Amino acid sequence: MKKYIRAVLDDLRSGKKDYFPPVPKPSKRAKTIDLDVPPAPVIATDLDNQELSKDPEEMVRQLDWQAQQKVQNPGH
């Protein structure tokens, strides 16, 4: 990587300002790091954070059940 950075800097100092040398391939021994954050797990008691069904009838049933739970337990 140092060679790549040095080559880029040398090219920028010279007249080749539009040219960038190709990025070197990563080492076979290098570990791949996944930067994506996994989604938060769904908590069954958290009615505002539940995944709803894609089926419209089932979604209506889920929302009705959630509304009933909120009426029965208004503090939660």
Image: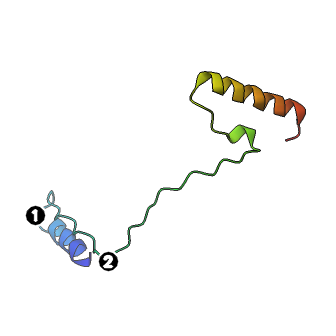
The residue at which mark 1 appears reads as: 15
Q: Position of residue 40 (x, y in %)?
A: 62, 51
User: How many other residues sit within 10 Å of disc 1, few (<14), some (14-19) or many (≥20)?
Assistant: few
Residue drawn at (63%, 33%) of the image: 52
Residue drawn at (11%, 62%) of the image: 16
Q: Position of residue 25 (x, y in %)?
A: 23, 68
Residue type highlighted by circle 1 = Gly
Judging depth in this view, the residue of 63 and 20 nearest the camera is 63
Q: On the rendered structure, is 37 left or right of 48? A: left
Q: On the rendered structure, is 4 left or right of 57? A: left
Cα–Cα span, label 2 and label 1? 36 Å
* Snapshot quadrant of residue 68: top right
Judge whether 4 appears above or below 58 on screen: below
Judge whether 5 appears above or below 19 on screen: below
Question: Disc 2 on helix, strand or loop?
Answer: loop
Question: Disc 1 on helix, strand or loop?
Answer: loop
Tell me the quadrant of the picture where the C terminus can be found.
Answer: top right
* Snapshot quadrant of residue 50: top right
Q: On the rendered structure, is 15 left or right of 26? A: left
Judging depth in this view, the residue of 60 and 25 nearest the camera is 60
User: How many other residues sit within 10 Å of disc 2, few (<14), some (14-19) or many (≥20)?
Assistant: few
Label total for image: 2
Residue type highlighted by circle 2 = Arg
The residue at which mark 2 appears reads as: 29
Tell me the quadrant of the picture where the N terminus can be found.
Answer: bottom left
Q: Position of residue 64 (x, y in %)?
A: 75, 25
Q: Say whether disc 2 or disc 1 marks the residue closer to the N-terminus.
A: 1
As drawn, the label of residue 3 is: none
Residue drawn at (26%, 78%) of the image: 2
Mark 2 or 1: in front is: 2
Judging depth in this view, the residue of 15 and 61 nearest the camera is 61
